Amino acid sequence: MFSDYTGDELQSIFIMQGFAGLSQFSVFLLMALGLAIIFGQMKVINMAHGEFLTAGAYTTVLMSDLVNTYCPAMRPYYFFFAIVMAFIVAFILGYIVEYLLVRHLYNRALDTLLATWGVSMIMQQGFRLIFGGREDSAELPEWLMGSWAPTDSIDIPINGLFLLGTAIVMTLIICLLMYRSRWGLCVRATVQNRTMANAVGINTKNVDRMTFALGCGIAGIAGAAFTTIGSVSPAAGSLYIVDTFIVVVFGGAGSLLGTIISAFGIAQAQSILEFFLSGVLAKVWVLTTVVIILMLRPQGLISNKVRK
């Protein structure tokens, strides 16, 4: 597999594919952070998670069109506002879905799977009716385009670096929220013992609603970030939902550290293998490795310690 390349060529290939894998890792991580909160903490199988990414992506495209039409002077800065709006739109949609549907299905994992799958179908059709079936894309600010070339043979895209920075910032914010805030304390208390959490005055229903909405809001940010590397279509989010579930389960449900390690490992392995093999063969090798490791370690890479 490596015999056709010189040592310098292999070094450049690994570095370039490594950075390409970092872009994929960033999307996986942003998607998986929201899903890790919803699935890992609440045990809700949210099959509509990808559609919240799509909602965030379309919000960014809409913001791009509005800025280009009515306020071109804001073009260099609009993307930061678009990320905030993508979070708000996905957060509100998640809040509504939890209130109307998911709150009636807690502790019924398979029912949440079927119900949210139905929601994903409805949302996809809604996107087709509103935005049409064709792919669309946001016009990126000039500072997000181009590349950085540290050597003659290595070319790293700026949008990939921005995507990675967004994923790192969001990971730090989620860790602070989960482990250094009163809200995170309420979430962990509700997950460990709902009855006792109610007894000490925690409004567990409100905690559930805000947790679900926050997870969906993070998917919206993933959607905004996704527009820097790809175009948007009504089914764009569904392309990532299976990979995201694999990342969460492989990392260990409910473990943020496990989710980060899992997303990094899977994205890097897929990126490098896709260069030397076909895309299908690369995915087969990665999935086979994940299945073997999960057979040996069913709890995932890192499991949360629970006092019994």
Image: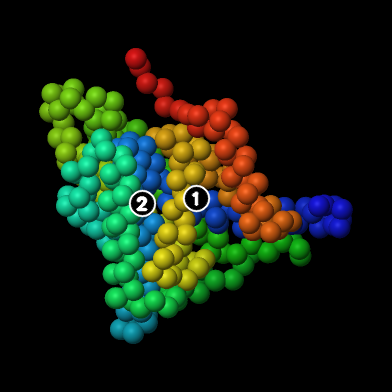
Task: Write down the residue under mark 2.
Answer: 47
Quadrant of image for the C terminus: top left
Instruction: Give the residue at x 17% y 25%.
Output: 195
Q: Dot 2: within a 10 Å radius of its alpha carbon, few (fewer than 14), some, or many (20 or more) residues?
A: many
Secondary element at image label 1 = helix
Amino acid type, label 2: Met
- Residue positioned 60% across, 64% down in the render: 157
| Location of residue 47 in the rendering, given as x and y in whole percent from the top left corner | 36, 51
Q: Is residue 95 left or right of residue 35?
A: left
User: Which residue is at the far bottom?
Assistant: 69
Residue 201, quarter of the rendered image: top left
Residue located 28% across and 57% down the image = 119
The residue positioned 42% from the left and 70% from the top of the image is 233
Q: Secondary structure at mark 2?
A: loop
Q: Position of residue 7 (x, y in %)?
A: 85, 52
Q: Earlier in the sequence, mark 1 or mark 2?
A: 2
Q: Could you tell me how far apart the alpha carbons at marks 1 and 2 are, in whole angstroms?
A: 12 Å
Q: Is residue 67 visible?
A: no
Q: Residue 142: x, y in percent?
A: 50, 74
Observer-nearest of 32 and 145: 32
Residue denoted by label 1: 243
Q: Nearer the viewer, residue 114 or 273?
A: 114
Name the image colouring: rainbow
Which of 54 and 166 lies nearest the eye of the viewer? 54
Vertical position of residue 46 compared to residue 162: above or below? above
Q: Are marks 1 and 2 in contact (CB under 8 Å)?
A: no
Residue 261, image quadrant: top right
